[in-house]
């Protein structure tokens, strides 16, 4: 039995909190599950909390990027919240482009941002801009 | 060198104790490179101390400076040169401390062993080597202390030059001063991201007024910092772009168009206030009262 990361449905959005050791197979499983859930619930937004994540490598970065891209195809916004400073530095140093993914400092901010995005008020969103192309 | 010669030199060291010391100090005092960093009294104390230790160490006829017989001498020299480096003596002055011993000592040796020129030559050669080694050792310790001072200052400077200021609720600022190399960028990034977490700020202002020049490397470092800030869920404004810098950026063809930039810090603060929903209103009524 492969360990899975729980995906919680709250209204139009899906909530994912990564609390365990996020290894490669788990990341791929999450990507698959999340895509299925988005289609099943026709969700409009995904909030991924990575505040407990202490390490990230290029593969993980790519998976997160792919999740964002896949969700975008299904008309669903992705917001990454609670990234640790060390992880942010690692990702920029690795040169991983997380294009299409939104970020927010806390889950609360992230939820607000997601609601704004869903209501198509993105022009009013002042924080958590799309990550710049490097 | 035979033990006889060593013994005779040891006896010279013992009997001519006073004369050699006096001449040595005389030599030191008339050294043209002498600064006022070391007073004469401490010069006298350290020469006497060194002379005693030197006499003690050479007593056994072992002239190998790295051996344990010479431990006290080496320790004394390390301490002495460390102290001098701190006091601000010049390198040549410090090295000269040992080298000035040559003349008074060699005059004595030549005088005492004058009857055999081969013996004098051999003795002088040995002792010259010994004093050179000691001098080099002193100089090396001096240099080490200096380097330690430089390293410490560098570290202090790195820490001092990257303060993260909380400007307003949800707004932090980093005034960057000096050249932005990768080591500095790393520290700026770390302290900025940490501050963002601690103050849960949504906006960070990077002020580059104090950065003298911007080249592709510096721009790359700035872009990196901005990307990392965005990953954290905050946004970054770059301010303090001087006219020349703006031209340089355009000439170099650096693409920072998706990063909001402002000419001055005050513009950046205004923008940050607007984005966080604060308004600055000027109260003309209270201004008149003043």
Image (cartoon, rainbow, N blue to C red):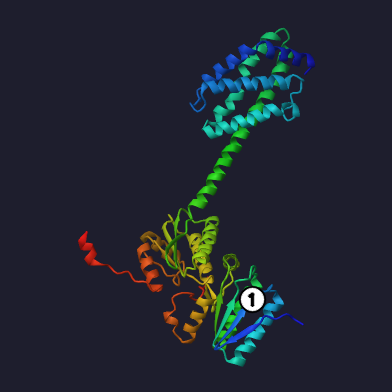
Residue B122 spot, x, y in % from top left? 73, 17
**Quarter-of-image position of residue A70:** bottom right
Left or right: residue B113 versus residue B185 is right
Residue at image location 68% in from the left, 14% down from the top? B13
- Can residue B264 be seen by looking at this rendering? no
Is residue B174 or residue A14 the one in the foreground?
A14
The kind of secondary structure element at disc 1 is loop
Residue B215 spot, x, y in % from top left? 47, 59
Is residue A9 or residue B78 the one in the foreground?
A9
Q: What's the chain of the residue with tag 1?
A: A
Q: Quadrant of the C terminus of chain B?
A: bottom left
Total marks drawn?
1
How packed is label 1: few (under 14 Cα within 10 Å), some, or many (20 or more)? some
Q: Is residue B168 above or below residue A122?
A: above
Residue B19 spot, x, y in % from top left? 61, 11
**Quarter-of-image position of residue A71:** bottom right
């Amino acid at each position: 039995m492969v360990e899975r990361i729980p995906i919680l449905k709250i209204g139009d959005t899906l909530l994912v909190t990564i609390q365990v050791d996020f290894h490669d197979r788990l990341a791929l499983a999450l990507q698959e599950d999340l895509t299925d859930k988005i289609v099943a619930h026709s969700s409009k937004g995904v909030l991924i909390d990575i505040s407990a994540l202490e390490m990230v490598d290029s593969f993980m970065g790519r998976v997160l990027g792919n999740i964002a891209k896949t969700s975008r195809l299904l008309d669903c916004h992705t917001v990454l919240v609670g990234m640790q400073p060390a992880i942010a530095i690692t990702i920029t140093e690795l040169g991983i482009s997380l294009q299409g993914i939104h970020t927010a400092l806390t889950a609360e901010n992230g939820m607000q941002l997601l609601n704004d995005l869903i209501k198509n008020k993105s022009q009013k969103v002042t924080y958590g801009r799309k990550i710049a192309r490097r | 060198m035979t033990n006889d010669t060593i013994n005779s030199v040891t006896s010279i060291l013992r009997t001519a104790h006073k004369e050699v010391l006096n001449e040595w100090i005389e030599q030191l005092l008339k050294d043209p490179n002498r600064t006022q960093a070391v007073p004469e009294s401490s010069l006298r104390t350290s020469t006497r101390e060194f002379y005693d230790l030197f006499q003690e160490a050479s007593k056994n006829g072992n002239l190998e400076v790295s051996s344990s017989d010479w431990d006290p001498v080496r320790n004394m020299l390390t301490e002495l040169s460390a102290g001098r480096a701190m006091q601000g003596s010049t390198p040549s002055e410090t090295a000269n401390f040992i080298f000035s011993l040559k003349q008074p000592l060699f005059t004595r040796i030549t005088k005492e062993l004058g009857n055999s020129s081969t013996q004098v030559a051999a003795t002088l050669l040995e002792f010259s080597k010994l004093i050179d080694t000691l001098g080099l050792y002193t100089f090396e310790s001096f240099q080490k202390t200096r380097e330690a001072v430089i390293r410490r200052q560098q570290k202090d400077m790195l820490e001092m030059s990257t303060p993260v200021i909380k400007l307003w609720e949800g707004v932090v600022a980093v005034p960057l001063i000096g050249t932005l190399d990768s080591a500095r960028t790393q520290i700026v990034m770390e302290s900025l991201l940490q501050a963002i977490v601690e103050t849960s700020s949504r906006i960070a202002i990077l002020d580059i007024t104090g950065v003298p020049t911007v080249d592709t490397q510096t721009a790359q470092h700035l872009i990196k910092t901005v990307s990392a800030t965005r990953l954290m869920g905050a946004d970054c404004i770059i301010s303090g772009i001087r006219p020349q810098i703006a031209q340089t950026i355009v000439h170099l063809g650096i693409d920072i168009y998706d990063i909001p930039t402002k000419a001055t810090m005050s513009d950046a603060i205004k923008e940050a206030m607007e984005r966080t929903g604060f308004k600055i209103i000027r109260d003309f009524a209270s201004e008149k009262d003043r």
